[in-house]
Image (cartoon, rainbow, N blue to C red):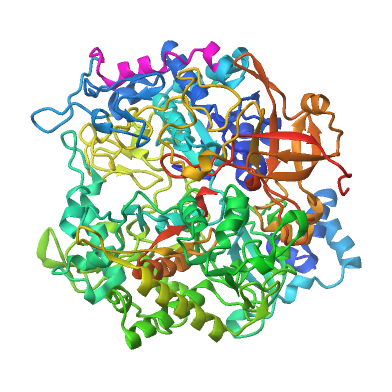
Amino acid sequence: MTNSWTDIKNTDLVVVMGGNAAEAHPCGFKWVTEAKQRRGAKLIVVDPRFTRTASVSDYYAPIRPGSDIAFLMGVIRWCIANDKVQWDYVRNYTNMAYLVREEFGWSDGMFTGYNEETRSYDQSSWEYQIGEDGYVLTDETLENPRCVWNLLKAHVDVYTPEFVERICGTPKDRFLKVCEMIGECASPTKTMTSMYALGWTQHSKGSQNIRGMAMLQLLLGNIGVAGGGMNALRGHSNIQGLTDVGLMSNLIPGYLAIPTEREPDFETYMSTRANKPLRPNQMSYWQNYRKFMVSFLKAMWGPAATAENGWGYEWLPKLDIAQYDGLRMFDMMSKGEVNVYFCQGFNPLLSFPNRGKLTEAFGKLKLLVVMDPLATETAAFWENHGIYNDVDPSKIQTEVLELPTTCFAEDEGATVNSGRWLQWHWAGATPPGESQTDVWIMSNIFLRLRELYRKEGGKAPEPILNLTWDYADPEDPTAAELAKELNGRALTDVPDPNDPTKLLLQAGKQVSSFGQLRDDGTTMGACWIYAGCFTEAGNMMARRDNEDPSGMGVYQNWSFAWPANRRVLYNRASCDLDGNPWDPERKLIAWDGAKWAGPDIPDIAVTAKPREVGPFIMNPEGVSRFFSRRLMRDGPFPTHMEPFESPVANPLNPEMRGNPVARMFPGDVAQLGDRSEFPLVATSYRLTEHFHYWTKHNKVNAVLQPEFFVEISEELAAERGIAKGGRVRVWSKRGEVWAKAVVTKRIRPLICDGQTVHVVGIPIHWGFKGAARKGFGPNTLGPFVGDANIETPEFKAYLVNIEPAEGSATS
Amino acid sequence: MNIDLSRRSFLKLFGAGAAATSLGAMGFGAAEAAVAAHVRQFKLAATTETRNICTYCSVACGIIMYSKGDLNAGEKAELIHIEGDADHPTNRGTLCPKGAALKDYVKAETRLTKPRYRAPGADQFQEITWDEALDKIARALKDDRDANLIEKNAAGTTVNRWTSTGFLAASATTNETAWLTYKTVRSMGIVGFDNQARV
């Protein structure tokens, strides 16, 4: 989230598209209710199903799964055509006036530079024109045909209301009503917020769905303002934190990058990181990258990381490909290329697509280690459970270790909510049996491995032997010890860079902000964006002052929000060029003549004069981007792409299948289904009574929603002879499931490209362990393909078929 | 008992359910008499309260856990109740159908309590000690790393890349667990590293 849950009360219009907050995030959704009640805010829901969020909306529009880009580009086209643009914002805070290279263009739904063999673009033309002074060329009049504004207008031109209706199945009048409601928020004193979740990410072009809305929000001047923003509703209690701390193939904590093998040494790595400003006076905050990276390396390897050895850079793994994400690892596993695999609180047998492939993959491991509070299906992938897990244990040679861990109630530390609040929690229960914390388990694994390297030697032992481990109890570091490392501290006395006779920070003291981190090895800090969370003043994450003097839902002294305790990102953009809030009623910060100040922490240097420094300080442009240059693999503008399995052809290019640059592994192409055999669109979702695959272990939740079902329209039920509550078989090219049929008015057939499209809703919560009845999930059916940029599996739009099945449903 | 009771101490005395309904229905004075007449000593009065955060979605509702026994005093603490934290700015005491049943998750019958091992071809788990399990893991890591770590690529660049062992990290563990996991996994050179953000 750019904003926070409590900030939603400041909005005038909530657009829920790609999510279902009322059911999946009920207690956060109350802030939508609050905005409706107190401000008269409106709620729009665009979704294939008439969800419970839709049931309390002011306006609902149906949409075919996987067609969101067409809808969003259509809204942008409408706003431009009807002059619903916050011009002062767009002119000054976006790259609308920037000139793009002459060679850049598009045709047939593709951008310049496509290479069919490598399934990738040569992106060299997706760039600005740069002048002799090293800065981007601009045309403030917006007359130059190569400026971003004119390119955008041309790009969205095809997305007429008729085209949107044809692609999305959204009736034209409904689409236009949504446009009108959204268009009102182009006013500087009206804001719209976007609340989305996996309904947007789980597509082969999920990132472009989100960019589409981000562009619309820029057009309306809604980024950085109270009640606005792009608000990703994260699905789990600390998936934000796990990502912040870099637990992904290609990340270092704080969104730094794991090096590639094309960067053999530290200086080569750094040479492309510290972005020089692309416009005069711009802050381009990544110029501080070296400070964050050196402080991270010092956190890893302490005294062994020196200037001479590039701060231990050599010890970091170097990638040869973009990333070894989950899908790739399971593909490698299925080919016998992985021997040992750990699942820490993660149940991939039910979470990743194409379960048949996963089962085969796990069977090729030598050792699977599962750490979990609960008995997971993954740990028991080799158990026979009839149709629910049809395997022969005697044929599976994988060794499995199932390790009992504590859960939240028995553990201490911080989790990060969607609004980037790091909230500390305390243990209040004795762990059951012999269960242990993940920290204890990981420490003991590490210490034993380190001991083996000490005794036996072996390959590249230095990164293991030199890893810092300064904990009072090496087998059980405390949460406070680890949190202090995340924050960072001075390793030696740090002189003040502005006055070397003065001391900035005494050796051993916690840094108070990332501004104190240094690139000369005098500071350590594991995760620069967390600096300030555990300072000399104490544990800021444990703060519980719920006063909100401004009434803006800021809660400045409740816990700690990264970065720098800032609650609304890009909040400089909530003010006009001179530093006055667009809407004085919703002031977050303002320029008082000498400095920036207000209820929130300014997202700009506090003394940076208005009209000099742009509000998007992380970008070398200082502004935000309608044209995203080479930052996304599938294009600098979002363009309509069909799902890999789609009931209709892409009208921009009927030959194109899915996202032309999304990664497909060879064996998976053959496992894609065709619309002639699988005419129905499947989409997965959550229920309000369940959380993922966890609450099926709880009696209460298992009673509330005991049994796996699929949801279909009355029309489809009639067409296929399916009775309400009857048993059905649903199958895709990859597998089959049996379920109870919920026949409903919530899903209606759509007319797309002249034909009727039926949608089958498949909730995710069942397996073969726990207190609920045994069942299936959508991952038996889903395709093994991910988003082109971040490899999120395409669970929200794929093809299935359905028929009545023998036997009655169990209830 | 005509004293000025705060909401929290009132709840402690008379029980959350009774207080919430009676307060609205009859007014404070009447509720006091009516409730006191037939409600036994509130079960939570003698418990230890601990602040925590719901472990499910990212709204991150504040919760209060009630335990018999005080963990900080070195006692065995048994969780007996969880409720929403009325002081929390986001949820203000409310919980959803998942959060309201959080105690069932902590006390689920399918909670794991002992390390278990499944041998090749076996059709069931057997118990194993922590020492045995940890030694087995360390040995397997050492052997696989020594056999398969790619120290240098074809160009002679040091790459310290280990692709034959992978690690899927969680979605509900703390930042502190995440950092310790990060340190150890990266020090070994594991690149097949992912979390639950994508699913």
Give x and y (percent) for residue A378: 62, 62
Residue at the farthest front position: A395
Instruction: Identify the residue shown where x is 20% and y is 74%.
Output: A492
Query: Which picture quadrant has residue A216?
Result: top left
Residue A150 falls inside the magenta stretch: yes
Query: Which picture quadrant has residue B47?
Result: bottom right
Residue at the farthest bottom position: A455
* Residue A273 in the figure: left or right of residue A561: left
Instruction: Give the total of numbered labels.
Output: 0
Instruction: Identify the residue shown where x is 49% and y is 61%.
Output: B169
Query: Which picture quadrant has residue B78?
Result: bottom right
Name the foreground residue: A660 vs A356.
A356
Residue A434 falls inside the magenta stretch: no
Give x and y (percent) for residue A8: 54, 39
Please indicate, yes or no, whether residue B91 appears anywhere in the rendered image.
Answer: no
* Segment tinted magenta in the rendering: A142-164
Name the foreground residue: A566 vs A637.
A637
Give x and y (percent) for residue A587: 41, 37
* Residue A574 in the figure: left or right of residue A41: left
Give x and y (percent) for residue A304: 22, 75
Name the foreground residue: A218 vs A694.
A694
